[in-house]
Amino acid sequence: MNNSELIPMLEAVLFAMGEPIEIERLCVALELDEIVVSDALAKLQEKYEDDTCGICLLKLDNKYQICTKQKFADSIRSVIEVKKNAPLSQAAFEVLAIIAYNQPVTKAFVEQIRGVDCSGVISSLCQKSLIEERGRLDLPGRPLIYGTTAEFLRCFCISSLDELPPLPENKSEQAASTESESEEDNSKVNFSEIQ
């Protein structure tokens, strides 16, 4: 494998890891000699030293990690704060309601109710600490189950899930129950008139 193939491969692996990784682990995974990998990492580090790059390659003992350059820390922090305080989307509210009223639930359960993929929304709600993983179901594939957090209670100003407002009834069920109630009232009236 030549450097033109190895350097972007290492870049992709380091980016995907998101945390420091030992050079030995990279060598084993890529089935390459440590000298070859070290040389490619040095060239990648050199590439990032350019002022047109916002990221750099850190060497931490025998580990490497891609991260942002220190001079952009304030900008990154402000963007992350904006993202943290961003209001919830309609989809996020729907997913949160499904989880809050039915917990613990799987992602598949939420998707079955909503009819669309909810991976991104669930991930976002986990990042905002409104929901959390609560373990796995003892079913094939061992799917994760989710529930709400103390942060959810704090954000919605409630002390327990018992304080959640009742769910509105289905309109067709409501109409049917109203009809049956009025029939019962009529039968009572008719019954009292017979007596």
Image (cartoon, grey):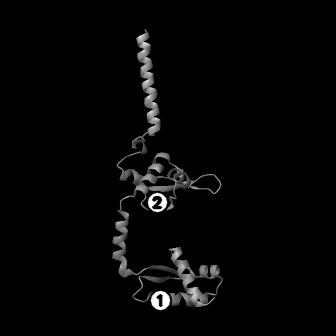
In the image, residue 33 above or below residue 127: below
The residue lying at 33 percent from left, 71 percent from top is 78
Q: In this view, does 109 lie to the left or right of 141?
A: left
| Quadrant of the rendering where the N terminus is positioned | bottom right
Which element carries disc 1, helix, strand or loop? helix
Residue where numbered disc 2 is placed: 121
The image position of residue 146, as x and y in percent, is 51, 53
The residue lying at 44 percent from left, 14 percent from top is 191
Image quarter for residue 192? Answer: top left
Q: Is residue 28 left or right of residue 157?
A: right
In the image, residue 74 above or below residue 134: below
Dots 1 and 2: beta carbons under 8 Å? Answer: no
Residue 167's disc is: none
Q: Distance between the residues labelled 1 and 2?
A: 35 Å
Residue where numbered disc 1 is placed: 47
Q: Can residue 124 be seen in this view?
A: yes
Q: In this view, does 71 lie to the left or right of 132?
A: left
